[in-house]
Image: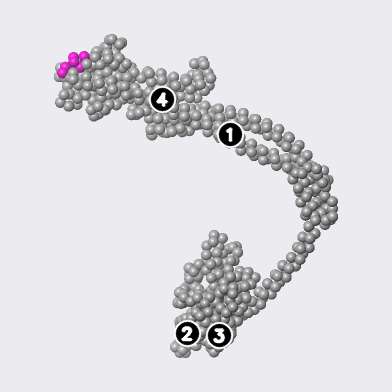
Amino acid sequence: MIKKKKSWLSHRITWRVLLIIGCFNVFIIGAVILFDLAISHFESEMRAQHMMEGIDGKLLTMLRAVEVAAKNSVAEMEVNLDSPEKVFDALEHEFLLNNRYLGGAVAFEPDYFASQGRWFEPYVRLIDSTHVERKQIGSAQHDYLKQEWYQKGFSMERGHGYLSDPYLDKDGGKCILSTYVLPIFDRQGRKVGVFGLDINLDWLKHTIASEENKVRMMSFKKKDPKEIEALSDMFFIQLFDSKGWKIAGSGTIDDETLKTIQKSDSIGFKKMKMNGTTYYIGSQRLGSTGWTLVVAQHEHFVLLYGYLLAFVISLFMIIGGIVIFFFTSLSIRRAITPLHYLSKSAHEVAQGNFDTRLPTFKHQDEIALLRDSFDTMQQSLKGYVEELKASTAAKASIESELSVARGIQMSMLPKIFPPFPHRDDIELYAVQNPAKAVGGDLYDFFIRDEMLFFCIGDVSGKGVPASLVMAVTRTLFRNVAVHTDEPSRIVVAMNEAICEGNDNHMFVTMFVGVLDLHTGHLRYSNAGHDAPYRMNGEKLACDSNLPVGVMPDWKYSEQEATLATDETVFLYTDGLTEAENALHEQFGEDRITDIVSSFKGLPQELIETITDAVNQFVGNTEQSDDLTMLAFKYTKQNISSAASIH
């Protein structure tokens, strides 16, 4: 039986260790995979960005050179506008100096040279570094005036030009090219036409193809061009003009993807579905051309190395986890063997055999320390049990005494309701709910000489000290109120008595009132207590007086009011307004006002309604302060009302 128990414990510890190692490995593997994929994603993004910036830089360099050459050529053209022959000579001269370009032309406004007709577009095409071809290509069939490059170039200001989208020039360069266009002005500053510098785009196509092959060879370690070409769908670059026509590059981008790309200057590095395949696509608008460069990388191309590295690391971690599990299981079985002997001895001690001998161990490890702790426990357990019995008995005695004290305290307060069943001029109800076994709140009332004497109070603090002061205060109220019907004198006498010998500096907030049951005339004195509510939801006006027990010579003021027939007065302690819910929100005076102002029933119903509202607001939150409420309703019919009834 013991052997089986030891085996179960070792297996449980082993499996827990395995679970911890497994969770740790899963976490590490997940982190490694995410990190590898993030690195792969970052490298692919940087690769795309680097290529786009490189191609953009080359194009920008070309544009700057073209712009300088075009501006110089325009300056030469503008001083040779005297005759068509001079224009041809100037064009030839410029292109022999700038033999890097395919050719160029000057397209004039209609009938600029009357002898040349409506369309005059002298064109010079570079044949080699020393020879050019001259021809006039303007005609009704080649109406350059309707061409976009002419219209846009003619709208430019002096010194400003633009690079046109690629187009097939059948009459001039006789190939697909782009033209850099600048406006031309005569000596009077009038705009007379445009100058166009034709640029062959083969270099751009070669540049993009070279970048594609470089990445494919580096990434897939392929040397055969045919094998490299077979991987063209994994990585490709495309260059589009402003209208979405492909200028250079391989691969295919669908129309929907192209529309998304052309909506902004750059889409960053975005994962998109293209032709049913997932690609990571980066795009960038090139300079001021309106052209868009796109770098597309297949999802597997982006994440392949991350997956491979994650697989290798995961495999090694799984193998390592299995090895660790084997040796950990063996070590745990050996390590817990001493626990068998210790558990047997501890079982005997648990049965009450406090003299049972405990085993000894040669290793001073945690198990030996546990054995020493059991030894100490064994020596002192018997004494602790005896002390526990004594303390339990003492606690039971204290609880019994507190229960008796609560009963005595509650018996001091009026608790029979209705208290005056034979009277038709007053209805009264009160309740006290202490936060502890005994509390510091009090209320009291009695009728003498057709006057209702009543009070409510709240002693500072809680528990037994507050309950003792509460008992003294209630006794003082009864003793003093027998001899006077002036509330202020009652409070003054109580204040002097409580201040005498008040070494603990305890005080009582009180409200003392005397109601004439014949007339409804109410006299009252407030000693730092919450002002009572009247039936209309308004509070009685109360002077600011100190609580009872604070200053022996304080002169308490007295105030008065007249109650109407069926008017209710509601008194309470701060345990009502300061009742808190689980969110530490207080019940507050607004909720009391809402209930009192709309209530028309008897005092008991009013207090029960407020009690239900407080319980619903507080919920299961523990009561933190004593709660006392007193309400009375003046129900005497005045003489005029009785006469009208008869």
Q: Which residue lies under the disc numbered 2? A: 521
Give residue 72's position: percent from left, percent from top: 25, 21
Which residue shows up at 68% across the image and 40% down it? 19
Q: Nearer the viewer, residue 412 or 210?
A: 412
> Marks 4 and 2: which is nearer the front?
4
N-term mark: 3 or 1:
1
Residue where numbered disc 3 is placed? 481
**Secondary structure found at label 1:** helix
> Which circle, 3 or 1, is nearer the viewer?
3
Looking at the image, which residue is at 22% across and 19% down?
Answer: 76
Magenta residues, as a range? Answer: 82-89
Q: Name the foreground residue: 81 vs 470.
A: 470
How many badges with numbers are in the image? 4
Residue 204 left/right relative to 349: left
Q: Position of residue 309 (x, y in %)?
A: 58, 29
Nearer the observer: mark 1 or 2; the answer is 1
Which image quadrant for residue 103? top left
